[in-house]
Amino acid sequence: MDWLQLLQNNIGEIIILIGGSGIIYWRETKRGKSLDNDGKKLDNNEKVIVEWKEMYHEQEKRCAEKDQIIVKKDDKIEQLRKEKNELLEERYTVMANREYEMKQLEALHAEEKQLLIQRIAELERENAELRWNECRVNGCQKREPPRDRKCLGTCADCKEQE
């Protein structure tokens, strides 16, 4: 009996293993193959490959579009940089011209200021001479100065004598 029971147990286990592996194999083959609209069996790998190819092509299109957008933005950035550099160059040129003009005007005004200072000094000297030689007598017909005239050499009489 031992042999018979052992044989039955072993045969039962073998049948269970074959049946279990058959079920697992059947599930895997069912997953791997499916039916399309025409009723043909397709391999699951082929479907996956087709889907991946479609996704790849879509992604490639998106990348191409984004590359074009990036190129356009880069071109715009370069254009704006050029405009900025041109404006800065123009600004520096204008500022340099203004600075040059300001220096010329300052030199001109310095010369004019020096001439005016000299003219003011001459007028102050003449004014001092005229005050020194002024006649202070009211009603004087001659209007001669009360003291000897000491000319500083700037009056018209001295210039005529020379």
Image (cartoon, rainbow, N blue to C red):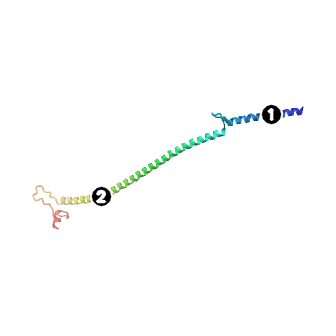
Left or right: where 19 falls relative to 140 = right
Q: Position of residue 157 (x, y in %)?
A: 16, 64
Q: Residue at x 35, y 55 (%)?
A: 97
Decide: few, some or many residues near mark 2? Use Cα within 10 Å; few <14, some 14-19, many ≥20.
few
Q: Badge 1: few (under 14), some or many (20 or more) residues near its Cα, within 10 Å?
A: few
Nearer-N-terminus badge (2/1): 1
Asked whether the residues under the numbered discs 2 and 1 touch, taking CB atoms below 8 Å apart as contact, a structural biologist would say no
In the depicted view, which residue is nearer to us: 126 or 49? 49
Residue at the spot 17% in from the left edge and 63% down from the top edge: 156
Q: Where in the figure is residue 106, as x and y percent of width and height?
A: 32, 57
Place residue 141 in its image quadrant. Answer: bottom left
Q: Which residue carries the number 2 mark?
A: 108
- 27 left or right of 145? right
Look at label 2 and name its amino acid: Leu
SS of the residue at dot 1? helix
Residue 162 lies, in percent from the top left, at 17, 68
Residue placed under numbered mark 1 in the picture = 15
Residue type at tag 1: Ile
Position of residue 2 measured from the top left corner of the image (x, y, whole percent): 89, 33
